Amino acid sequence: MLQHGWGARSAVNRLVCSILVLASGISAQRSLDDRIAAALDRARPAVIRLLKKGAGGELALICLAAVHDGLGSRDKDFERAVARLAKSNLSGTYALSLRLMVMANQQDFPNREKIAASDARDLIERQSQSGGFSYQQSSGNWDLSNTQYAALGLRAAVSIGIEVPERTWQRLLEVIAKSQKKNGGFGYLSLASQNQATASMTVAGITVLEICLQQLDLDDDGEREIRDAIDKAWEWMADNKSSIGRLNERWCLYYHYGLERAAVLSDVTEVDGLDWYARGSEMILKLQRKSGAFMNPMNIRRSTQRRESLVDSAFAVLFLRRAFRRSLDHPVTPGPGYSCLTLPIGASQDEIEQAARNDTGRGSKAVPDLLICMRGNILARRKAAAMAIVKITSEDFGYHPYRSAEDNSLALRAIEGWWLKHRRN
């Protein structure tokens, strides 16, 4: 009897300990969520100030960050910045690609179809004979950074309705696949004997390969070969996961935004057991200044002591928002009221329900955005997205907003499968 009682008490104690550990984990996650949301709230006035200062490619970059931060045409500063961007005479690979990315996310961009068609045409003409891209039009040499942004820009162009020749994607896929190193990583330059693999270029290589897979109808063997290359690149990242959240990693904020894109495209939530978003966010939160802007201290000398770094702030917001989408088939349509993507962390129940109603009204087109929210770290958005999913699909798929993305992985895959079958409806 005594032994039975002791065993029962031990079982109860183990259960209590398990509950406390689980609660501690949830509390820690919510604490990070709270800090991220607070940092983004502090950053928004800085983003608006920087919208007024940006020019050329930097203006396109801060506009993209503003779009992902939830600013829309109802914000006058954003509207004026977009108008300036529409009138800008852009020529470089980065600038053209970034403007296309803004237009893909902003349906009321001035003269959208005309400018997008021109930018896409200019971008395609910059493809080198080998298939890669450089800063300007090139006959041979290319670098992976420019090539990554060109792929992102062309992907955005396709979502707007602009035809990109299959040959463009095929040449791009071939040159990037051939540039992968035996260890799985990728380097920056196309013709450098000392071209070592780096973390920022490896996630860039993954991004380009994933985008090409989206755009090309490969046979089973061809797709399997590229999937194997992507898996090998992620293995390189696993071996070098210490680069994640490391401040002195070369071009650290540029790299982390690249990591966010690659991870979303590959549906990767952890790199060898490491939560890349949590680790990266912890680092970025430490870089926020009193002004709300972000500044990597490694860049201070290069930025001539500017108090606010436009580029650093844009990359920081883009990473923290984690709003990059695997598919651009259905861009966000601006409209009144909250959507799940723009709900603040402290949203009331009424606001959560209103956001769910707004997104429900968009039907199956809202599902890619709802999936972003359901994988995200803001509970209010997960709740609203879960409500909208039930209304749109008449199923809950076993998704629970209080569980982690990992614990909800089967449900999330089921929702994505539903969307793939119904996205044309």
Image: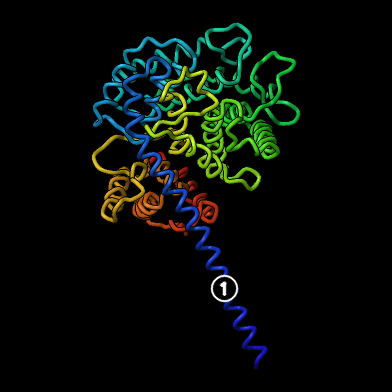
Q: What residue does disc 1 label? A: 15
Q: Amino acid under label 1?
A: Leu
* Residue 313 image offset from top left, x and y in percent: 43, 29
**Within the image, what quadrant is residue 192 found in?**
top right
Q: Is residue 342 visible?
A: yes
Q: In the image, is 290 to the left or to the right of 352?
A: right
* Residue 198 image offset from top left, x and y in percent: 66, 27
Q: Is residue 393 visible?
A: no
Going 35% across and 40% down the picture, which residue do you hit? 41
* Residue 300 image offset from top left, x and y in percent: 50, 23
User: In the rendered view, would you say 148 is above or below 19?
Assistant: above
Judging depth in this view, the residue of 159 and 142 nearest the camera is 142
Q: Residue furthest bottom?
A: 1
User: In the rendered view, would you say 245 is above or below 18?
Assistant: above
Going 46% across and 36% down the picture, which residue do you hit? 325
Going 52% across and 23% down the picture, which residue do you hit? 299
